[in-house]
Image (cartoon, rainbow, N blue to C red):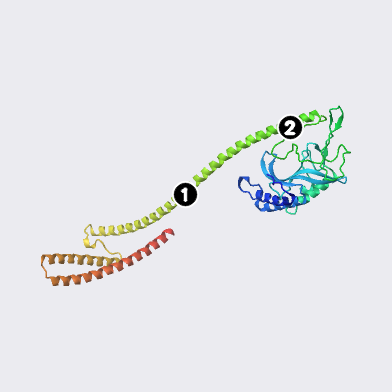
């Protein structure tokens, strides 16, 4: 992706819009930069383009040495170089790696098809990779692209990294040999054609290089190239193509395996949630059963104590028990409750007998009403007393259960 071309006056606006769009993308198409440094990356590129308008920001695919491909930002174009009082334009590509700006960018010299890289060169290896002290001493956040390019331009001016090839002689129709014209992009009017070998002037025609998404076809070699070198380079290209193909197949298989593992992981997580939920329910049920067991144990103790007490009484009386003495109140409240309940039931029986006698005509009506009124009044007092005794018994039972529970826990 590249920003749309336009007039120079609007180029800065389009560059800002382009960088804002690509750095604000989310999802699978997002650039692999940290969110907290995307604004700083935008400022670095805008400052670089403002100082060096010949460089333009783009997004392209970068191939790592391990076969991984990633979409990154790059600044593509030329930088000025002053050599023997003449200005030349050196083509470079600045890759902003995933860890930029905490780590330095990756810079390649991009020779055109009529250019060759000087061998050996102290700062550029045969593949075009640039290595200068500024990159090795990169310090975040003080280091920036503008100072990097200035240092690079100064070092290239002292020792140019590119040279033009020797011009080939092509026969014309009349049989004469005329030298072919070497393309030049000299920005200074002092450039001349007197030297057959001199610092290269780039064009925007890129040859095969270690950067980019694909390997374009290699340019035609001159007849002066060594056949052994040509064969070696062709073999290396074939091996690289085969290697990239194998890496692509291997990556596709590994992605399929990872997708299967991710699906299995999701299924295992769902099962883990179900198991955790079932475990929680079982623990809650266990706590409820333990509480019920405590209540049963307490009631068992009470029943066993009652049985021991009454078995002793049965042994003492030799089996001759008085029905009225079978149940004895255990405390004053129980005794009072028993008396009130017995009186209430007795009055209920008397009222029933009076109703039957009145229906049969055994007693007069006024005597019936007088007795019913008196009995009902007495029954009301007995029932009210029973209600108060029952409430007091409930309070005493609760206090007794709390004391037993504390003793059980201890």
User: Which label's residue is closer to the chain start, 1 or 2?
Assistant: 2
Q: Residues within 10 Å of mark 1 (few under 14, many from 20)?
A: few
Check disc 1 and report its element: helix, strand or loop.
helix
270 vs 151, left or right, is left
Q: Residue furthest left?
A: 361
Does residue 257 sit above or below 20 in this rendering?
Answer: above
Q: Circle 2 is placed at which residue position?
A: 236
Check disc 2 and report its element: helix, strand or loop.
helix
* Image position, residue 94 (x, y; %): 74, 45
Q: Quadrant of the C terminus?
A: bottom left
Report which quarter residue 217 is drawn in. top right
367 and 162: which is toward the camera? 162
| Disc number for residue 277 | 1
Q: Residue at x 36, y 55 (%)?
A: 296
Q: Quadrant of the N terminus?
A: top right
* Image position, residue 322 (x, y; %): 21, 61
Q: Residue furthest right?
A: 194
131 and 298: which is toward the camera? 131
* Image position, residue 32 (x, y; %): 66, 47
336 and 394: which is toward the camera? 394
Q: Residue at x 25, y 69 (%)?
A: 382
Q: Is residue 256 visible?
A: yes
| Disc number for residue 42 | none
370 vs 223, left or right, is left
Q: CA distance from mark 1 to mark 2?
A: 60 Å
Does residue 129 sit above or below 15 in this rendering?
Answer: above
Give yes or no for contact between labels 1 and 2 (Cβ–Cβ under 8 Å). Answer: no
Report which quarter residue 320 is drawn in. bottom left
Q: Nearer the viewer, mark 1 or mark 2?
A: 2
Q: Is residue 37 visible?
A: no
* Image position, residue 344 (x, y; %): 23, 66
């Amino acid at each position: 992706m590249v920003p749309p071309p336009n007039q120079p006056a609007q180029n800065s606006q389009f560059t800002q819009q382009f960088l804002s769009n690509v750095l604000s993308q989310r999802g699978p198409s997002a650039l692999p930069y940290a969110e907290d440094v995307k604004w700083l990356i935008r400022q670095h590129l805008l400052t670089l383009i403002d100082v060096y308008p010949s460089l333009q920001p783009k997004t392209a695919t970068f191939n790592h040495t391990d076969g991984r491909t990633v979409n990154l930002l790059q600044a593509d174009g030329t930088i000025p170089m002053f050599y023997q009082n003449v200005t030349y334009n050196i083509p470079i590509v600045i890759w902003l790696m995933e860890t930029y700006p905490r780590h330095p960018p990756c810079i390649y010299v991009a020779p055109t098809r009529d250019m060759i890289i000087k061998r050996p060169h102290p700062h550029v290896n045969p593949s075009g990779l640039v290595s200068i002290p500024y990159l090795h001493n990169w310090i975040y956040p003080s280091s920036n692209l503008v100072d990097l390019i200035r240092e690079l331009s100064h070092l290239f001016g002292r020792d140019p990294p590119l040279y033009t090839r020797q011009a080939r002689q092509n026969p014309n129709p009349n049989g004469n040999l005329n030298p072919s014209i070497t393309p030049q992009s000299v920005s200074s009017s002092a450039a001349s054609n007197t030297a057959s070998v001199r610092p290269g002037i780039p064009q925007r025609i890129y040859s095969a290089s270690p950067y980019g998404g694909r390997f374009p076809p290699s340019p035609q070699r001159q007849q002066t190239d060594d056949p052994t070198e040509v064969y070696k380079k062709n073999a290396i290209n074939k091996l690289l193509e085969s290697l990239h193909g194998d890496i692509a197949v291997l990556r596709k298989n590994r992605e399929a395996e990872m997708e299967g593992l991710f699906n299995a992981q999701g299924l295992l997580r769902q099962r883990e949630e179900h198991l955790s939920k079932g475990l929680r329910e079982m623990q809650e049920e266990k706590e409820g059963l333990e509480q019920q067991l405590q209540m049963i144990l307490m009631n068992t103790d009470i029943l066993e104590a009652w049985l021991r007490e009454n078995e002793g009484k049965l042994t003492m009386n030799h089996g001759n028990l008085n029905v009225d003495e079978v149940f004895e109140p255990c405390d004053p409240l129980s005794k009072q409750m028993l008396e009130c309940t017995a009186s209430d039931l007795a009055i209920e029986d008397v009222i029933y007998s009076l109703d039957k006698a009145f229906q049969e005509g055994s007693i007069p009506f006024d005597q019936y009403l007088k007795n019913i009124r008196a009995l009902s009044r007495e029954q009301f007092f007995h029932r009210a007393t029973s209600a108060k005794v029952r409430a007091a018994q409930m309070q005493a039972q609760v206090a007794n259960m709390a004391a037993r529970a504390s003793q059980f826990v201890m």
